[in-house]
Image (spheres, helix red, strand yellow):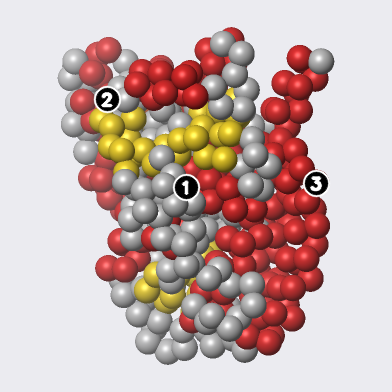
Amino acid sequence: MNAHVQGCAAGTEIATSTVRRESGQREVFCGLTGIVWLHRKIQDAFFLVVGSRTCAHLIQSAAGVMIFAEPRFATAIMEEKDLAGLTDANDELDRIVTQLIARRPDIRLLFLVGSCPSEVIKLDLSRAALRLSQKFSPAVRILNYSGSGIETTFTQGEDACLASLVPAVPPGGTGEDRLLIVGSLADVVEDQFLRMFEALGIGEVQFLPPRNSTALPAVGPNTKFLLAQPFLAETARALEDRGAKRLAAPFPLGVEGTTAWLCAAADAFGVDPVLFETVTHPYRARAERALMRYRGQLAGRRIFLFPDSQLEIPLARFLSRELSMQLVELGTPYLHREHLAEELKLLPAGVALTEGQDVDLQLDRCRSARPDLVVCGLGLANPLEAEGMTTKWSIELVFTPIQGYEQAADLAELFARPLVRRAKLVA
Ligand code: SF4
């Protein structure tokens, strides 16, 4: 990163913390949850979960968090006789898919999404996807990935989904470098970034996932990609196997993260630092002014982040550096040291960082610390609220547009709101 580009993160603070690792009981949603935002992003895709009634309920309740859910997902429910091997689950699946495609001609991409039950009976969804693709190609492309797991976390569903798309993308050439943004972003955020890349003179920018499955980006040795989300390890590996190069950067949360993220692309594409400054300065100045209001409400407040969304590290960096919040404990389900390297440099020295979870031990630490605000999954929020603590649901951070300059203050507000609400209740 060019040190002379004003506004680029300097990255001089190195975290000296040691990471606590826990591997006890976890309190998380499984990867099926990702369907809730992915089905809205890829507008001609359908997600067919091959699972149980529990899986169907999970998706319905996760979708209930969103107001605009549309029926482009469903569960092919496996009954007891399927699980006992009394019917041929493959025949049944073929029948359901055939019916679905006949009824929904708008579907161009169908994901068969594996679950715990489909894995228990060893239903081979990759073979099913291949078989059904042969039947329905080229009208409908059929892919598969797994959303199952009690040892996973809910954002891994997006990683598995995007990784399953990589073999389907067309090959990139060896010509002029192209920028690829990886990770689903709200359309409004994507449009803002597109305008900014255009103003910086960075040619044609592509996105994975695309809004439409017929617009899959070409990927090859001339692809340079920026991760927009910190939970895409498998997808990044698949892209690198295709010859693409990852640009190291913090994630675009807050003013500083957004600037450094854009700066990584600007450096890689030889953008003049003066142009970078000219393009980004007005956005930065406006976002910093908007943040001021929340700094007053959040500075000095103590926050405890339970491991859940994998967004915790970039969020903690934003909250501590731009809003002066104090990090009591920072939990992350997994720590991908390489993808998070630029973030770790920016965390305050000595931060209590935990990887994995032993939920009871972590709850004990949280209770004894009595933080002002706890960021956690839905399962922990209610009991903690009942104990008088103020909480923020981490899943909301994935459903809300929070990336980029224009959303920096909205992101801060998500943390200020529960504190304001609690203050009103107490008053
Ligand atoms: S954890 Fe397994 S059984 Fe439960 S909803 Fe997720 S995939 Fe279905």
Find disc 1 in the rendering and name its residue: 313
Please provide percent x and percent y for residue 20. Answer: 31, 38
Q: Quadrant of residue 288?
A: bottom right
**Circle nearer the N terminus (1, 3):** 3
- The tag on residue 409 is none
Q: Nearer the viewer, residue 145 or 6?
A: 6
Residue drawn at point x = 68 percent, y = 42 percent: 299
Q: Which class describes the residues within 10 Å of circle 1: few (<14), some (14-19), or many (20+)? A: many
Proximity of marks 3 and 2: CB atoms separated by less than 8 Å? no
Left or right side of 337 for 9: right
Q: Quadrant of residue 170?
A: bottom left
- The tag on residue 293 is 3
How far apart, in angstroms, are the residues tagged by discs 2 and 1? 21 Å
Q: Amino acid at mark 1?
A: Ile
Find disc 2 in the rendering and name its residue: 24
**97 vs 236: above or below:** above
Q: Amino acid at mark 2?
A: Gly
- Camera-side mark, 3 or 2: 3
